[in-house]
Image (tube, rainbow, N blue to C red):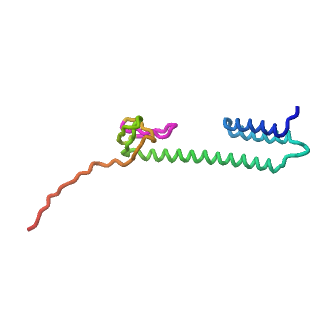
Amino acid sequence: MTISANEAVNGATTAFQTGATTSASSEDKQMFLELMVAQLRYQDPLNPSDSGEFLAQSAQFTALEKMQDVSDRVGALLGAQMAFGAGAMVGQQVSWIDTDGVTTHTGSIAGVTFGAQGPVFDIDGSQVPLAQLLSVGTTTPPTTTSTTPTTSTP
């Protein structure tokens, strides 16, 4: 039984694509190298593959790997920025909507915890996720007006 180069490439490409979603980066590199070896092994000796194609594939794989690394770093930066922002909100007066989507409440943020879904605020004993906040403002003490007696001069 003879396997054509296209069949070998298509089979290896399918295996690579399905494995890429579930495997780690080092396994992806190994699969890429196996794909390249399969292409070389099953190529037609009378019509060899262009080495430029392999170089282009390698460059594309490296570029994809670098873009994934950048994406991971941006995600980590966003998480850190959200954590710092949520921490700075402690002591702020906020209003939020209840889980029913109708009732609104106000209170002061006493603390914040960080879960898988993002920051969760402790507001007057209630646990409120960031997505439920409607407005944020600083707590202001009640204003008092003082009256000073005025004297009129004749």
Tell me: 14 left or right of 83.
right
Q: Position of residue 30 (x, y in %)?
A: 75, 39
The C terminus appears in which quarter of the rendering?
Answer: bottom left
Residue at 37% across / 44% down in the picture? Answer: 94
Magenta segment, which residues?
111-124
Q: Is residue 116 magenta?
A: yes
Residue farthest left in this picture:
154
Residue farthest right in this picture:
46
Tell me: 91 left or right of 118.
left
Q: Position of residue 138 (x, y in %)?
A: 36, 49
Q: Nearer the viewer, residue 51 or 126?
A: 51
Q: Position of residue 148 (x, y in %)?
A: 17, 57
Q: Position of residue 110 (x, y in %)?
A: 38, 40
Residue at 12% across / 62% down in the picture? Answer: 151
Residue at 71% across / 47% down in the picture? Answer: 62
- In the rendered image, which quarter is residue 93 located in? top left
